[in-house]
Image (spheres, rainbow, N blue to C red):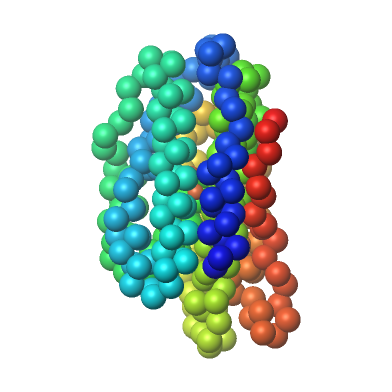
């Protein structure tokens, strides 16, 4: 886990600059759907992660607990960046939304491993979502922010895969299959909810539903292979690797 602590520290010290001074000129057709969608993602990433910090501390590895602290800080940084965008677009941030309440409730039901599995559901979708936002606008401020968040999300996925692969190392074949089937169902239900709730912005950035659904499925397959492939039997290595930030 030391590698991950180093990764998060490196990533915190090496944030690319965002040209905020030039202001945001969002395409007119994108403005309203982007605001409505970002408000919900901003709320989702602004949590303090108190339960997750608690769980991580109880796992007995101080290096992992420190990496989780930095991971949560990185999510809060995403919320801060999205907050700046909303302020620039003269839109308020949300303090409450059903989708956020739903995930907070689910995450608090179980222990660390299950909490990470629930947390990974929107994380996998966020990777494709921020890539879509990046590709769907020409504004340099928005592109810089969305590119950075999408890169960070790659790191988050790989970080959780690394931990869960070890945590599930001794899980029997049957339990792996059951866990995978239930997790896939939950993932697809989450995909559906996100696609419905954020359909206007996905349409505005030109991503069709089938493409989004299939791309999310590919991300899920890579993450699931990383977690559930028995490494000791020589299973495939996780496809997702941490990528240190570079200045654009
Ligand atoms: Fe994030
Ligand atoms: Fe994340």
Residue depicted at x 28% and y 47%:
101
The percent position of residue 90, horizontal first and vertical second, equals 38, 14
Residue depicted at x 40% and y 28%:
83
* Residue 159 left/right relative to 117: right
The percent position of residue 135, horizontal first and vertical second, equals 66, 30
Residue depicted at x 58% and y 36%:
15
Screen quadrant of the N terminus: bottom right
Up the image or down, 185 lies above or below 165; here it is above
> Toward the viewer: 110 or 57?
57
The percent position of residue 50, horizontal first and vertical second, equals 29, 55
Question: Does the image show residue 58?
Answer: yes
> Toward the viewer: 1 or 175?
1
- Where, by quadrant of the figure, is residue 241 drawn? bottom right
Q: Looking at the image, how many numbered discs can be counted on the residues?
A: 0
Residue depicted at x 33% and y 27%:
93
The percent position of residue 199, horizontal first and vertical second, equals 50, 33
* Residue 99 left/right relative to 8: left
* Residue 84 left/right relative to 172: left
Up the image or down, 74 lies above or below 183; here it is above
């Amino acid at each position: 886990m030391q590698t991950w602590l180093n990764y998060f520290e490196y990533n915190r010290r090496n944030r690319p600059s965002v040209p905020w001074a030039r202001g945001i000129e969002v395409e007119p057709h994108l403005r309203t759907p982007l605001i409505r969608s970002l408000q919900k993602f901003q709320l989702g990433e602004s949590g303090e992660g108190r339960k997750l910090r608690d769980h991580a501390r109880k796992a007995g590895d101080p290096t992992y607990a420190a990496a989780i602290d930095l991971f949560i800080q990185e999510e809060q940084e995403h919320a801060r960046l999205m907050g700046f965008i909303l302020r620039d677009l003269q839109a308020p941030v949300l303090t409450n939304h059903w989708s956020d309440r739903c995930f907070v409730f689910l995450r608090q039901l179980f222990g660390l491993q299950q909490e990470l599995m629930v947390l990974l559901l929107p994380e996998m979708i966020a990777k494709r979502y921020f890539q879509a936002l990046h590709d769907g606008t020409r504004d340099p401020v928005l592109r810089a922010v969305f590119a950075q968040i999408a890169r960070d999300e790659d790191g988050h996925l790989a970080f959780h895969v690394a931990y869960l692969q070890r945590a599930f190392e001794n899980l029997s074949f049957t339990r792996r299959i059951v866990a995978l089937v239930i997790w896939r169902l939950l993932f697809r239900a989450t995909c559906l909810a996100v696609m419905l709730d954020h359909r206007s912005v996905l349409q505005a950035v030109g991503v069709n539903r089938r493409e989004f659904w299939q791309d999310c499925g590919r991300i899920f397959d890579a993450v699931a292979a990383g977690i559930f492939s028995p490494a000791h039997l020589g299973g495939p290595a996780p496809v997702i690797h941490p990528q240190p930030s570079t200045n654009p």
